[in-house]
Image (cartoon, rainbow, N blue to C red):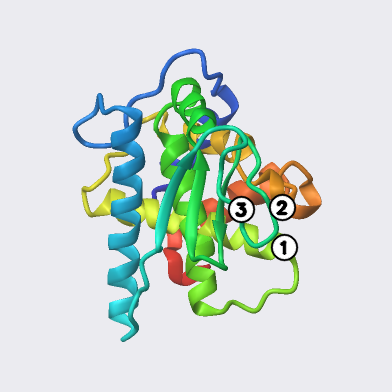
Amino acid sequence: MTRALILALTLLLVASCGLVRPPSMDSQGGDTFEDDVRGARTLTEAFWQQQFAQSGRTYRPVSDFIAYSGDSGPSCGNQPAVPNNAFYCPLGHFIAYDQTWMDSLWNEMGDGSVYLIIPHEFGHAIQAQLQTDFQLNIQMELQADCYAGGTLSALVSSGALGAEPGDEGELFASLEAAGDPTDDWLNPAAHGTAEQRQQFFVKGFRNGVGSC
Ligand SMILES: [Zn+2]
């Protein structure tokens, strides 16, 4: 990412207001919400499969990818799923998301929200496989943001996703709006401030997942 682009990102972040539907990130454009969710999952897993293979490891795909609405989500151990959330459950090695909530983010903020939330949750699935040894939740969350940034930049460089002006502002706005209420997403002490989260996202975006 060039310095000019970073500056543009910062300006977009400040200017981002969500009134105009931002441009689509996928190269075809005009996809449905379901297409974007499916695409984000497929591309993210393909990326990690490659990363693992490069270091002689075998990536273990998530066992399930579950859409739910409101209170109807799967529980994780004895923790019930809550509305307006997406989460990774290490016990069943699955990802679940409230599709009504994510669909409304997709409508309000564009497809960048989906391309952020899904790779972030896969970041937690990666941590489980690498047995990351962090003591604090905030470290896990910021690393997942960094992984999401690294995943997205790799997908953009490979041509799988097209980044257009506006996308990064979209992603940054999503960083503030989306997350895991179950692990206290809105508490800055748990997930990091908006600034920290953007910082870790940009770190991954610029330097790749290896820097996370
Ligand atoms: Zn998280």
Q: Are marks 1 and 3 in contact (CB under 8 Å)?
A: no
| 208 w.r.t. 30: above or below | below
**Badge 2 vs badge 1, beta-carbon distance below 8 Å:** yes
Front position in the image: 133 or 65:
65
What's under tag 3, amino acid-wise? Answer: Ser
Picture quadrant of residue 111: top left
Task: Give the image location of residue 195, x and y in percent.
Answer: 67, 45
Q: Disc number at residue 61?
A: none
Residue under the point 56% across and 19% down: 17
Using the numbered discs, state the Cα–Cα distance from disc 2 to disc 1 in whole angstroms. Answer: 8 Å
Q: Position of residue 28 (x, y in %)?
A: 19, 32
The CB of the residue at mark 2 lies under 8 Å from ligand 1 = yes
| Mark sitting earlier along the chain (3/2) | 3
Give the amino acid type for the residue marked by disc 2 in the picture.
Answer: Asp
Bin the neighbour count of mark 2 within 10 Å (Cα to Cα): few under 14, some 14-19, many 20 and up. Answer: some
**Which of the pair 59/151 is nearer the observer?**
59
Q: Earlier in the sequence, mark 1 or mark 3?
A: 3
Can residue 130 be seen here? yes
SS type, badge 3:
loop
Please state the horizontal and vertical placement of residue 5, each as a whole percent of the image: 42, 40
- Residue at image mark 1: 137
Task: Tell me: 195 left or right of 89.
Answer: right
Element carrying mark 2: helix
The label shown at residue 75 is 3
Q: How crowded is mark 3: few (under 14 residues within 10 Å), some or many (20 or more)?
A: some
Q: How crowded is mark 1: few (under 14 residues within 10 Å), some or many (20 or more)?
A: some
Mark sitting on residue 183:
2
**Relative height, residue 144 to residue 17 (above, below):** below
Measuring from the top left, give residue 159's x and y in whole percent.
Answer: 21, 48
